[in-house]
Image (spheres, rainbow, N blue to C red):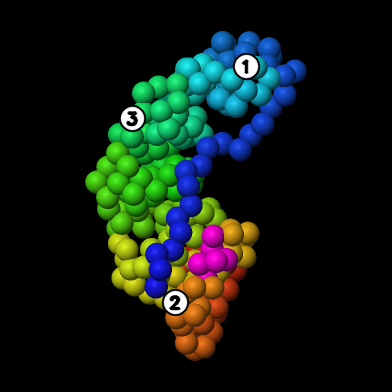
């Protein structure tokens, strides 16, 4: 079976207008962690202010140093991409890890990606599967898709078409386009009985809010 596609790193999806910049800047200078993070996003994307990667990193770092998981992930992404700082995958991983151990699903997903691909760490598909699983059971759709791909390919976990189908079908149901394509490839290599069993397990997994997966 062809290798299944992996999803990419995530950064925060928030957006802002120019009218919010001055108020956000004032609050950020006072040490408000949410404002610091939001200011980082504004500079990162050029929303409400001229785009400036260096300023984005400055404000992401201030919020990240206060322990804010979202800012830790966004700072990690800046290091991974080499935006506003020299590219440093190892540093990126450390910031992802700080957020991941706090239970933040996006960070757990990103940590899964770096282990999957050997970015800043030695490639380790088992470790990738562990972090994808932590994010997947919190409902992180791209982590569900990638965990399903690992089961389909037998990377880091025993190859298991049924487990692959469970996670891919859930990700598909929640709107992941890669999962939709990957599950079609997987089904072509499964028997009707295997598909039926997998569908029942997927239903149980989803209806238990990912506690019985």
Name the residue at 60% across, 68% down: 207
Q: Position of residue 8 (x, y in %)?
A: 48, 47
- Residue 181 in view of the camera: yes
Q: Which comes before the other along the chain, label 3 or label 1?
A: 1
Q: Position of residue 55 (x, y in %)?
A: 51, 16
Name the residue beneath numbered marker 1: 50
- Residue 66 in view of the camera: no
Q: In what element is the residue under mark 2?
A: helix
Few, some or many C-alpha atoms within 10 Å of disc 2 (few <14, some 14-19, many ≥20)?
many
Q: In what element is the residue under mark 3?
A: loop
Q: Which residues are magenta?
A: 178-183
Mark 3 vs mark 1, CA separation in Å? 25 Å
Q: Which comes before the other along the chain, label 2 or label 3?
A: 3
Q: Position of residue 85 (x, y in %)?
A: 40, 22
Name the residue beneath numbered marker 2: 162
The residue lying toward the viewer, choosing from 79 and 144, is 79
- Find residue 8 and name its label: none
Mark 2 vs mark 3, CA separation in Å? 38 Å
Q: Position of residue 194 (x, y in %)?
A: 47, 84
């Amino acid at each position: 079976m062809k290798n299944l596609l992996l999803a990419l790193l995530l950064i925060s999806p928030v957006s802002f207008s120019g009218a919010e910049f001055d108020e956000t800047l004032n609050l950020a200078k006072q040490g408000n962690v949410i404002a610091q993070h939001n200011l980082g996003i504004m500079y990162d994307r050029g929303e409400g202010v001229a785009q400036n990667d260096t300023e984005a990193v400055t404000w992401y770092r201030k919020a990240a140093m206060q322990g804010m998981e979202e800012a830790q992930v966004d700072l990690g992404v800046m290091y991974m991409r080499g935006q506003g700082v020299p590219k440093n995958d190892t540093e990126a991983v450390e910031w992802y890890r700080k957020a991941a151990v706090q239970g933040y699903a996006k960070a757990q997903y990103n940590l899964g990606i770096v282990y999957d691909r050997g970015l800043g760490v030695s490639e380790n598909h088992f470790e990738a599967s562990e972090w994808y699983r932590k994010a997947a059971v919190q409902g992180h759709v791209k982590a569900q898709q990638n965990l399903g791909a690992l089961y389909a390919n037998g990377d880091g976990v025993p190859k298991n078409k049924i487990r692959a189908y469970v996670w891919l079908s859930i990700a598909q149901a929640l709107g992941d386009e890669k999962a939709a394509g990957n599950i079609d490839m997987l089904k072509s290599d499964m028997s009707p009985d295997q598909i039926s069993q997998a569908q029942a397990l997927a239903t149980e997994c989803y209806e238990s809010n990912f506690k019985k997966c």
